[in-house]
Amino acid sequence: MTLQHDPGASSADAPDAPARAAEPLPPAPGRAAAVPDGFPVDAFQEDPENVVVTAPAGSLRGRRRADGTITFFGIPFAEAPVGMLRFQPPMPRARWSGIREARFHGATPLRAELPGTFIPEPAIPGDDVLNVDVFTPSTDPAAALPVLVFFHGGGFTAGSPASPWYDGGAFNRDGVVTVNVSYRLGLDGFGWIEDAPANRAVLDWLLALEWVQGNIRAFGGDPSRVTIAGQSAGAAAVLTLLGMPRARGLFRAAWSMSGLDAGVAPERAERIGRALAALGGVEPTVAGFSSLSPERIAKLETEAAAGGLKPTAATRELLDDGPGFAPTIDGDLIPHGILEAARRGLGAGIPLVLTATDDEFAKLFDAHRGALRFLPKSWMLRRLGIPRRRRRDWVADNAGLRGGTAGWAGRYVSDRVFRAFALELAEVRGPAKTWLARFAWRSRAQRKRAVHCSDLPFFFDRLAADGVAAALGPNPPTMLAGALHADAVAFVHQLDPGWPKYSPRNAEVEVFDAPLPETVHDGFGSVRALT
């Protein structure tokens, strides 16, 4: 079904993709997911329990689950970033001897579980934090299955690849090998340090993708059929890689969920790095920061990035300049910001899906709802920096919005950071193969809103995972999860999610809402005034 103009939303190059092939479809709720010809029918009938594979990196002992998925957790792709290696580029891991244990999740850069997070984010101690988790239905190299490499979110300072929401079992069921990447966070990964190289975590991403190229055949994957995907900061990682010459040849397609324009100017990165050093009472050098514990640094990162600004001013800085810890546009490894790279045609040959939820950061001001109800929305929107003409047009396009001043402020931040950015990037890419989608299903547990991260259990088809019921309420729509997940599977297999491609002329957007998705003309029309 095709609808007309949306009156306001609810509260590395590769060859062109081939046309979608007719392939056998297994039964699934919502939409059926394509499984390639030649998929081994005995993939789920091999010996039970422990599974040993030998890859170029070394031999690993994984575990076969009752659902048929074989997991290999905590596989190191780099030497542990400790001691002299802590603030340096990742060093490729030497091949190990013997059989390495891979039945349990590896160490995470996240050192302590954060209270009140929307997603369960386990923090696992240990030094080997540069690792990958592999989920596969078969360890037969002849399977040559497509591969999905996922980068977790967390604002570049938090997040965990070990979250149960990122389990690759459903993708395995549908013939996709899944790899989750652990990378350095905060200062260790992204912060400016006077005598250390920039973009250390970006180099982590590259090395992880190089590891996939060299090793994934041993896990039944095809290194020539890699799709990268990520959510929030992880989506920004995907979009950054899209515009990086050094990432060419490491993947053939990309899927961005709630991506943002996250590039940091070198001058701002230096200012934040110096501020963090001053707060810690050390010099902004490797020696100075090495004298601070990771726990101490984690406590100082937010304060340094905010620069002493009050909450509204700090939010405006986020709107204007992006997060404080993020990839640095150094003119070398990252020659341009995401939008500028797209304008220059970098990554134009890579099929790209861009999605955003309708209410991303709408709850940002919920704690201040009572106080803000006495203030006019025009005053708050001025404080957040929206120009008068754009404010007038944007307010008119969202006339049905509810929630008072707090609701308007949260919607503006959501639209400016995520939704308008997705629309602008889609338009900047012009004729390049791009698909645009909204996740619009509104959870009663979130004041009837489609908030940031709420699409993740649908993408992974993990509605029964720990924490989902608490975050989304009881009985989220399984048919919608089946539809979104199946479209992701189709994209990984066939480089086409099955919706109309976006172009400035047709402006067609896929809207994921219960019971099933619909194609909407000008589906991001309510944010167009901000682009």
Image (spheres, rainbow, N blue to C red):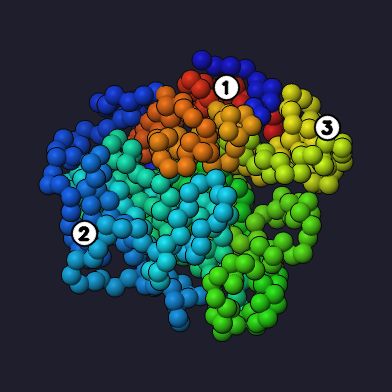
- Above or below residue 300? Residue 166 is above
**Left or right of residue 114, residue 80 in this image:** left
Q: Are marks 3 and 2 in contact (CB under 8 Å)?
A: no
Identify the residue shown where x is 74% and y is 65%: 307
Q: x, y percentage for residue 2?
A: 54, 16
Q: Would you identify the image quadrant in which residue 526 lies?
A: top right
Q: Would you identify the image quadrant in which residue 279 lies?
A: bottom right
Instruction: Identify the element where label 3 is drawn.
Output: helix
Q: Earlier in the sequence, mark 2 or mark 1?
A: 2
Q: Earlier in the sequence, mark 3 or mark 2?
A: 2
Instruction: Identify the element where label 2 is drawn.
Output: strand
CA–CA distance in space, label 2 to label 1: 47 Å
Going by the numbered disc 3, the residue's amino acid type is Arg
Q: Residues within 10 Å of mark 3 (few under 14, many from 20)?
A: few
CA–CA distance in space, label 1 to label 3: 24 Å
Going by the numbered disc 2, the residue's amino acid type is Arg
Going by the numbered disc 1, the residue's amino acid type is Val
Q: Residues within 10 Å of mark 1 (few under 14, many from 20)?
A: many
Find residue 520 and name its label.
1
Q: x, y percentage for residue 5?
A: 65, 20
Find residue 61 and name its label.
2
- Above or below residue 432? Residue 63 is below
Identify the residue shown where x is 57% and y is 22%: 520
Judged by depth in the image, the label closer to the viewer, 2 or 1, is: 2
**Left or right of residue 111, residue 304 in this image:** right
Find residue 392 and name its label.
3
Q: Earlier in the sequence, mark 1 or mark 3?
A: 3
